[in-house]
Amino acid sequence: MSGSNFEAGSMLPTDDAASKPVLDKGRDEMRNFAFLLLENFSMMALTAAVDALRTANLLAEEELYSYQLLSMDGIAVCGDLGFSAVVDAATTEVNLQQLDALVICGGLRVDLQADAQLSRFLRRSDVKNLALGSLWNGVFALAHAGLLDGKSCAVHRENRASFRELFNKVDLKEQAYVITDNVFTCAGGNSSLDMMLELIAAAQGKPFVRGICDILTGDRIHDGGEPAFMNEQADAQLPQNLRDVIALMENNMEEMLTPEEIAALVGITRRQVERLFQRYLGSTPTRYYLELRLKRAHQLLTQTQLSMSDISLACGFVSYPHFSKCYRQFFNKTPSSSRKQA
């Protein structure tokens, strides 16, 4: 994976429009990303996107994703915070055949006028065969190149009016981010992370992404640290009965409660509990309880020096072999490898 260094204080200032699908590979096949930085790009949006990829690699203990930073001329680019990001290559130097996705990195103060050189680059056939994304108002560059005609996208609300005036063939959505079969765009810094997490979920599954959320968004007190797409019923507040069941599970991991005990303590039937989990969480109570215990085990493995046996008992497993088997199936690695990585 290519990294990037940030240097403080450095202030650096004939193809047809796309007529075929931009994306040759599905979302679950995107592995190699390049981020093309525009002057005054949003540092927050970029770091959120890159952090999602880096954390996925950390959890998997292998390089699931690679990324590199680009600029048109290969020179460091000044972000919106006033310091520069050193890039890995110029657009003329990068091997596009080794990429799956190109992401245009904008920001609130990025120049929104058409750039002829950038548009020519984006219209190249080898670029149009990539998945194309944008952060913040980097979407303007894609639209100027004609790559969004007839497609849906998101843009920061400060720029929506001008975007509609300029690009009436583009379906602008008033959403935090939009992912179609061929384009992924987000409106700002916060939505950058959620968009990348959904892309990762397409390949690795929601349980894996919940592990990333535990690390990167654990301070989201009010929504449990998970982006909206993780729950198809996210707009509906969880019923009190369901919240009570989850609280019982979280507070009873070492001495697990049976489904009948949980139902009785909440005052509903076991079947009602099962229906609540299926409707609001798309899971079963047994599976959800297991995921909670395995996540707790992961925290204990990586943050304490407790023995493997003590951790398995603390998380409600009858034996270490059973715990190890469940852990390996959920995280795709052994408990010992997680501890070693930490």
Image (tube, rainbow, N blue to C red):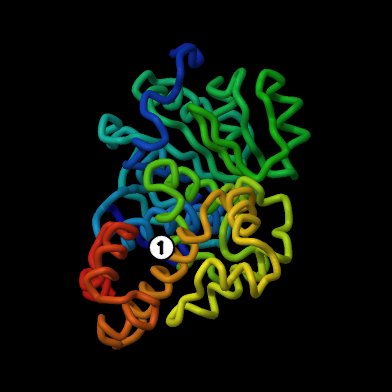
Q: SS for tag 1?
A: strand
Q: Could you tell me which residue is drawn at 38 percent across and 83 percent down?
A: 314
Q: Which residue is mark 1?
A: 6
Q: Tell me residue 258's x, y (percent).
A: 50, 71
Q: Could you tell me which residue is drawn at 28 percent across and 53 percent down?
A: 2
Quadrant of the image occupied by residue 251: bottom right
Q: Is residue 184 visible?
A: yes
Residue 215 vertical placement versus 330 (above, below): below
Q: Nearer the viewer, residue 167 or 191?
A: 191
Quarter of the image containing the C terminus? bottom left
Q: Nearer the viewer, residue 276 or 105?
A: 276
Q: Tell me residue 41's x, y (percent).
A: 54, 50
Q: Could you tell me which residue is drawn at 39 percent across and 53 percent down?
A: 53
Q: Is residue 278 left or right of residue 300?
A: right
Q: Tell me residue 149's x, y (percent).
A: 60, 19
Quadrant of the image occupied by residue 89: top left
Q: Tell me residue 282's x, y (percent).
A: 55, 49
